[in-house]
Amino acid sequence: MHHVVLDEWSRRTSPVHRAEPRGKLLGALAFLVCVATAPRIEVPQFGGYLLLVLAGISLAKLPVVPVIARAAVVLPFSGVFAVMSAVAGDTDRAMAVVVKSYVSALAVLLLVATTPLPRLLRAAERLGAPRMVIVVVQFLYRYLFVISEQAQHMRQAARCRGELARRRSAGWRARFRAAAGALAVLFGRSYERAAAIHQAMLARGFDGRIRSLAPPAGSATGWWLPAAAALVAVAIRLAHRMEFPWPL
């Protein structure tokens, strides 16, 4: 599953991984603002943004092709609005929606793939993010692994019973009914497991806040890399006309 792969990537070692999480968060925000406020799609400008992100991926020692492929997950959603804009006769806006969404997705993926989510959420909390939002995201992150574990157990059990081979030879309606039933069972088993985990947390004194035993790391040397990346993104943005065509 995608979140398992991203978690494995975020545990690697590189200069980007060792950078200060707060700096990476602020640098990514500055990059996204520069991309979002670009008045039009210009090849030199967005080529510079793309090269900046690819340089970060290379410096982080991440597999380039899988990262590029996973960032394309936003294209079906942005493609709908792009098609609507193209049908309305605004091809420039259609191209802007696709290009901006994909470049932004690459930047966010680089951030998540180089920073473990607990450290990233801790950095967001230290920057003043609402604690309730932090707790909700932490629970969502943890229970994704619960659902993944239950899905793997169910798949292994089905393989042992030979059900997977029978489903491949059945018609699409039978496969759809089997998938719907498996999804319902997965939800029930995951809910039961999540309730047991919550009871265990309450028994250990959970008071609505997930605490970390590791002290928050922070050093001046960890800020220079995200600061440099943010300055490059701002320089690319300032090199073009400062126009802000709202909304887009």
Image (cartoon, helix red, strand yellow):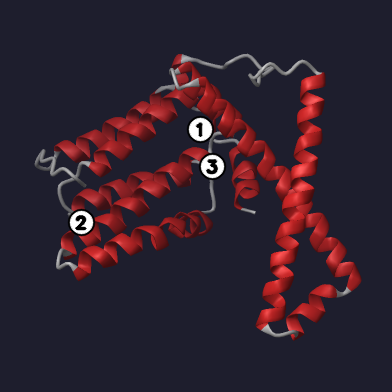
Res 43 label: 2
Q: Amino acid at mark 3?
A: Ala
Residue 49 screen position, x and y as percent: 29, 46
Q: Kindly indicate whether the residue at mark 2 contacts the one at mark 3 (C-beta within 8 angstroms).
A: no
Res 1 label: none
The span from disc 2 to disc 1 (Cα, nearest Å) is: 29 Å
The span from disc 3 to disc 2 (Cα, nearest Å) is: 27 Å
**Left or right, residue 94 beside residue 115:** left
Can residue 151 be seen by looking at this rendering?
Answer: no
Of callouts 2 and 1, the N-terminal one:
1
Which is in the foreground here, disc 2 or disc 1?
A: 2
Residue at the spot 76% in from the left edge and 30% down from the top edge: 198
Q: Nearer the viewer, residue 200 or 68?
A: 200
Residue, disc 3? 113
Of callouts 3 and 1, the N-terminal one:
1
Residue at the spot 55% in from the left edge and 22% down from the top edge: 122
**Left or right, residue 101 beside residue 197:** left
Residue 37 screen position, x and y as percent: 21, 41
Q: Amino acid at mark 2?
A: Val
Helix, strand or loop for disc 1? helix
Helix, strand or loop for disc 2? helix
Residue 129 screen position, x and y as percent: 45, 22
Q: Residues within 10 Å of mark 3 (few under 14, many from 20)?
A: many
Q: Amino acid at mark 1?
A: Pro
Q: Is residue 198 above or below residue 248?
A: above
Q: Nearer the viewer, residue 67 or 4?
A: 4
Residue, disc 1? 15
**Left or right, residue 21 beside residue 102:** right
Q: Quadrant of the N terminus?
A: bottom right
